[in-house]
Amino acid sequence: MSSRAGTSADDQFYREFIIDHFKNPRNFGRLEHPDISHEEDNPLCGDVIGMDFQIKDGVIEDIRFHGRGCAISQASASLLTERLKGLPLEDAKKIGKADVLGDLGIDISPARIKCALLSLKVLKVGAYGLAAHEEDEE
Amino acid sequence: MIAGRAQGAPNVSFDVTAIRKDFPIFETGIAYLDSANTSQRPRQVTGAMMDYFEKFNSNIHRAAYRIAEEATVRYEATREKLRAFINASSTKEIIYTRGTTEAINLVAYSWGRKNIKKGDLIVLTILEHHSNIVPWQILAAEKGATIEYVDIDERGELRQDQFRKLLERSPKLVAFGQVSNALGTINPAQEMVAAAKAAGATVLVDGAQGAPHQGVDVRALGCDFYAFSGHKMLGPTGAGVLYGRRELLEAMDPFMSGGDMIKAVRLEGTTYHDLPWKFEAGTQAIAEVIGLGAAVDYLTGLGMDAIRSHEREITEYAYEALSDVEGLTLFGPPPSRRAGVISFALEGIHPHDLATIADRDQVCLRAGHHCAMPLMTRLDVAATARASFYVYTQKDEVDRLVGSIKEAQRIFK
């Protein structure tokens, strides 16, 4: 259990930019003709995230995400799309858990780690064709 | 001191402040609003278990030495306490299981495989916990039986008209919960059992949320099977109960097999033990069963009527307090028709975010699908937040929940 004290003025967990990404998600929506489209869900919380990718010359030219769920899952997806847009696929492949958690910049409890990493799972399973269960087993 | 109290019920009138002193966990300062998930356990329960571990730890039903006799006596004493608690006719009808889930699986396996045939109808409800759905789905798939689910109305109460219609199709089995774990709906179990029995069905009542809060008289209820868990009624995890009518249990084959459930094993075949031990294979959860006995003593000491009225008071208080919160949607029936469970949603805030924020105020709140995904789908939500209450819940904990909700709304504004 967390030992952090909930102080209202200085909120460590739900930082303003996370709430901002949740309420005003970047790159939200669908692409009309995606090269790759993939969706994953977390049935335990009902979080859903899908991503549409447009790839040109090995570069993620455009990206959109859609879905619903908690602030952590949605903000993490929004942040990830910002990272991915314009990135060569080869570089995108190097993105890992530490990067996603680093972008969120908060201390994620074990109970919420699946929320935080759902978008990464969409990226890995969708864009790289990894089996979903492999990702789960890590 | 602990050992002395472990034997008997606490000698207190319904005084929540005094009750809370029996639960050391509240010294940590938590507001615990997740008793429908698992309850807290008083010193009397943990003390009874410690007595076993420290004074007569040994295996039951086997050894001739004194501490093993003591262990066996205490283990079997719980059976009589449980019999009285649910008013069964005989301790032979009280089967120890790990919990409600195992109890229902036992029926699905031992009764279901013998009695459910191709084309048979099983009637369940949309309110059921997964543990009262999945075992029947597996059985139905194996046997080629059909399952129909009774729907709810807009208040979260079972559609009795639809239930009666389904009974006209002569279901072989009807299984439903006494109280919904997700919405708190108190089902009209008495009438439903009577109607189902009149239609010729065998009836299982899932009492996981009923036994701890409403109590039950299985003979008055008239059901064939009744399943409940110790850990939701102040007892430890790993000890629960299947009640079954004796003639049904007698006709059933064992569920698990091996040691202790036999009379004689020969190479050419085995004679099973008598009830209830026929269904209790292997080394049992001895400490847990002894702890469950202490939990029954504790509840009996408080009185189920007093427990019900305390929970009603807290539920009404919480319902009113939550109704006053802007942007909050309550699911399920009005407080007069529900047990101490309140499921709700906050506009623009996912239940998990609320639960995380509440956690930082040491408020333990459940968020999720409550093992009732078909119901969540029916309500068109992915998850809800749920507050649930018990003997030790005080209004201050509800106030702290409302504080956490307001804090969440401030953060997400």
Image (tube, rainbow, N blue to C red):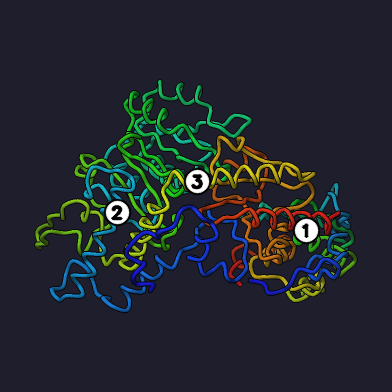
Answer with left or right where residue A24 lies relative to residue A6.
right
Whole-Å distance between the Cαs marked 1 and 2? 48 Å
Quarter holding residue B25: bottom right
Badges 1 and 2, same chain: no
For disc 2, the marked residue is: B81
- Which residue shows up at 62% across the image and 50% down it? B386
Which amino acid type corresponds to the residue marked 3 in the rendered image? His
Percent x, y of residue B57: 27, 76
Using the image, determine if residue A30 lies above or below residue B120: below
**Residue B104, numbered circle:** none
Height in image: A130 above or below B323?
Answer: below
Q: Nearer the viewer, residue B388 or B284?
A: B388
The chain ID associated with circle 2 is B
* Residue A57 seen in render: no
* Residue wearing tag 1: A71
State which quarter of the image contains the C terminus of chain B: bottom right
Q: Amino acid at mark 2?
A: Lys
SS for dot 3: loop
Q: Does the rendering let one see residue B220?
A: yes
Give the Cα distance between marks 2 and 3: 27 Å
